[in-house]
Amino acid sequence: MKFKICENYKIWFGISSAIIIIGLIVAIASGLNFGIDFTGGTMMQFDMGREFNVEEIQEVLAPYELDADVIHAGSENHEVIIKTKVNLSNAERIEIFDSAKEAFGIEDSAFGQTEQFGPTIGDEIKEKALISILLASIGMLMYVTFRFEYKFGVSAIIALMHDVLIVMAIYSIFRIPVNSSVIAAILTIVGYSINDTIVVFDRLRENIKYMNKKSHFEVADISIRQTLRRSLNTSLTTLLVIGSLYVLGVESIKEFALPLLAGVITGTYSSIFIASPVWAIWKNRESKKHSYKAA
């Protein structure tokens, strides 16, 4: 007996709802862990003149209690970028550099650039990100509705919103810093997820023509099984590439790769366990309503 995916939609909806609700509770209680891109703070850049470990820099910064992000920079990763939410005065920045100079024996000329900025830019980024997601969702709804039907479009958008909420819930629960790279990754996730969902919907549309005697849940399950190998293979190859970037990349690349990893997994999950069941539930209720009126 084959496992029924769509008819067990309560299990999948329950799992997703639990993650989203927990993330929402944590976000309300503690707030999202916004990075310096959104909160404002201080950025400093030094040329270490050699390769270094992040732990070495963190040891020097420990007495100042900055809770700073330390990022490799430069063509040979000899430069370090220090980002902290603390607004440091000019004297405090010089003091930190003097500590690094003493610890690593670097010259005065190694002090590259320093910058202090407020949260205004972060508010602008958040606003534009929300507008971008909204416009993308409207465009995708129009496209899927034109190519398939309105119910397919709404189901796809629900799956997209599910993906965004799950990724943000993961960041909320595990207190992972949210920065501009996360926003860029989420926009990428939205595009990837809709592609996987359309593959399932395309097969579903074809099967409806030849399976009139089967229920919508059965047709959806058959369509999912027919496209499952393709979806998994695509996701696995994508995960291999992004996983390599995360393992081998520098910190700035990891900040972008991490939400992509979560998004690809979530997008594959929603295409199978969210989008198709939503469509099947909608069509099933519509059929029952028409049957009731006919009776």
Image: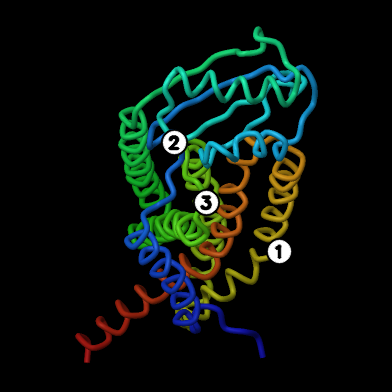
- Label 3 sits on a secondary structure element that is loop
- Label 3 belongs to which residue? 176
User: What residue do we see at 37% from left, 79% from top?
Assistant: 284
Name the residue at the right extreme: 50
**Type of amino acid under label 2:** Lys
Crowding at dot 3, Cα within 10 Å, few <14 / some 14-19 / many 20+, comes out as: some
Find residue 229 and name its label: 1
Residue type, numbered disc 3: Ile
- Closer to us: mark 2 or mark 3? 2
Q: Give the secondary structure at mark 1.
A: helix
Q: Is residue 72 left or right of residue 194?
A: right
State how far apart marks 2 and 1 are (Cα): 45 Å
Q: Tell which of 36 and 102 is nearer to you.
A: 102
- Residue 89, given in percent of the width and then of the height, sits at 42, 22
Q: Is residue 5 visible?
A: yes
> Mark 3 or mark 1, which has the lower sequence index?
3
Q: Determine which quarter of the picture holds residue 27.
A: bottom left
- Kind of residue indicated by mark 1: Arg
Q: Which element is circle 2 on?
A: loop
Query: Are the two marked residues, 2 and 3, in contact with CB atoms closer than 8 angstroms?
Result: no
How far across and how far down the image is residue 11, in percent?
Answer: 49, 81
Q: Verify CB contact (< 8 Å) between mark 2 and mark 1.
A: no
